[in-house]
Image: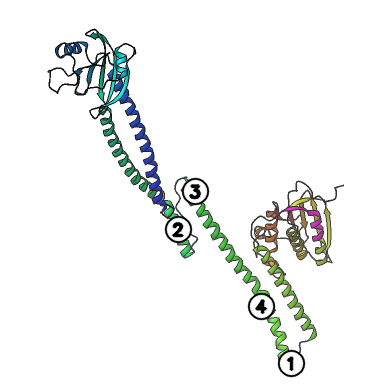
Amino acid sequence: MKRLPLRSRLALLTAAAVAVAVAAAALACWLITRDQLMKELDKSLRQPDIIPAAVIANTLNQDGCHATAPAQGDGPGRYISATTSAQVVLANGTSCWVQGHITIPVNETDREIAARDVPDGVLRTVTASGHKLRVFTAPANFTVDRVPAAVSVARPLSDVTDPLTTLAWVLLAVAGIGVVGAGAAGTAIARAGLRPVDQLTGTVEHIARTEDLSVRIPVEGEDEIARLGQSFNAMTSALASSRDRQQQLIADAGHELRTPLTSLRTNIELLERSEATGRAIPPEDRRALLASVKAQMTELAALIGDLQELSRPDAAPTLQVVPLHEVTGTALERARLRGPDLHITADIAPWFVRGEASALERAIVNLLDNAVKFSPPGGRIDVRLHGGRLTVRDHGPGIPAEELPHVFERFWRSPSARSLPGSGLGLSIVARTVHQSGGTIGLTPASGGGTEATLYLPGAPTAPPDAPPEP
């Protein structure tokens, strides 16, 4: 069954379901009809005037008692029904033929009924002359030669079985036609119902063959197939977007790596040429070249670290309760080392968040690095943390309003900052880390000049067990 196509399985299941339903309905119909016919047969045998008393009296007066039924045609007008047999049973066991072609067997119950030992009539099924008969025996209201009598009336069970046989063949034919029709209908329904699945299969095969993620499946209606098509279109859109971002990241990374590598190669070639030609570079120029090489290596290392950070999957990280005030304090120490001539003020209140301590520290260090980078010599940087809101404000030249929407894009750098060290990835890493922790980040022009970065992270439900109590 599993090896068959889905369309064939649906058609077979539909035909099987219809076959079971039709068979159950036909069997119920046949059983109900059989019971009804048997009740009607028994009811007809119980009718008091099924054999009129005048017929019985006339037969007894003319022919007397016969142990066997006479041949058909004897005594015109004698037969009330072609399938009904009747006889009179005496208390001594003698039977007197009245009507029909079959002599009904007499048993002890018939004699007891004739002798009035059994006051009510009795129904039974007997076999006589190769025929099954339904017999009803009841006490008679007359005597024969002063001997008590009973009347037995019989009808063949073929009056019931023959119509039932015909009905069974009719039901079987109807069931067969129904099953065949159900199979054909199931095939048509499966073909129509699975047409969107065929389209989906063709689209998937086309994408696998051509890697063209721009293909979309037409979606009609709101059923499960339509939802499947919508989900598939959403998946291909996400894959196309992911591939575009990956290609853009590779292109941007290649562009950013090209500049320091070109400069590094130029400096190394100068040093190599000096060694090859024996023409020494002046000590001051040599120190400058080595300092440039070191700076470019540092820039390359920072860029590679940023790329590794961005290459991490976007899945939700493992979060834990982190003391944001301690993370901020560690980042401030690193920032003071990078800008020893700057005056950095800090107003930090305890605050616990859920996040990754290392990622949050890197994000705050990036914010402080930007403030250090754009602050004038001897400038001031104000850092404040209260209620989960961390602000870093510098007093540098600021960021033009038209450039603010782009500051969190990967590899984006303002024209005024392209001459400064950096990869253009720092703020995008900050935004990613903050969003993964459920927070927000934004940059705005500060009143009086400079830029203010505002980072907000919601508080954790509880502080970690080893955290000191707040004063």
CA neighbours of label 2 inside 10 A, class few (<14), some (14 to 19), many (20+): some
Query: In the picture shown, does residue 78 fall above or below 191?
Result: above
Q: Which mark is residue 262?
A: 4
Q: Which corner quadrant of the image does residue 259 belong to? A: bottom right
Q: Return the residue nearer the eye: 284 or 116.
A: 116
Q: Is residue 124 left or right of residue 212?
A: left
What's the residue type where badge 3 is placed?
A: Arg
* Badge nearest the viewer, 4 or 3: 3
Task: Give the image location of residue 25, x and y in percent.
Answer: 36, 34
What residue sits right under mark 2 in the picture?
Answer: 203
What's the residue type where badge 1 is placed?
A: Gly
CA neighbours of label 4 inside 10 A, class few (<14), some (14 to 19), many (20+): few
Q: What element carries label 1?
A: loop
Q: Is residue 80 left or right of residue 289?
A: left
Mark 4 or mark 1, earlier in chain:
4
Task: Give the image location of residue 99, x and y in percent.
Answer: 19, 19
What residue sits right under mark 3 in the picture?
Answer: 227
Q: Residue at x 37, y 44 (%)?
A: 15
Cβ–Cβ under 8 Å for marks 1 and 3: no
Q: Return the residue nearer the eye: 202 or 308.
A: 202
Q: Which residue is drawn at 70% across and 57% down?
A: 433
Looking at the image, the residue that sits furthest to the top is 146
Mark 4 or mark 3, earlier in chain:
3
Cβ–Cβ under 8 Å for marks 1 and 2: no
Residue numbers of the magenta segment? 316-331
What's the residue type where badge 2 is placed?
A: Thr
Q: Is mark 3 on a helix, strand or loop?
A: helix
Q: How far apart are marks 4 and 1 (CA)?
A: 24 Å
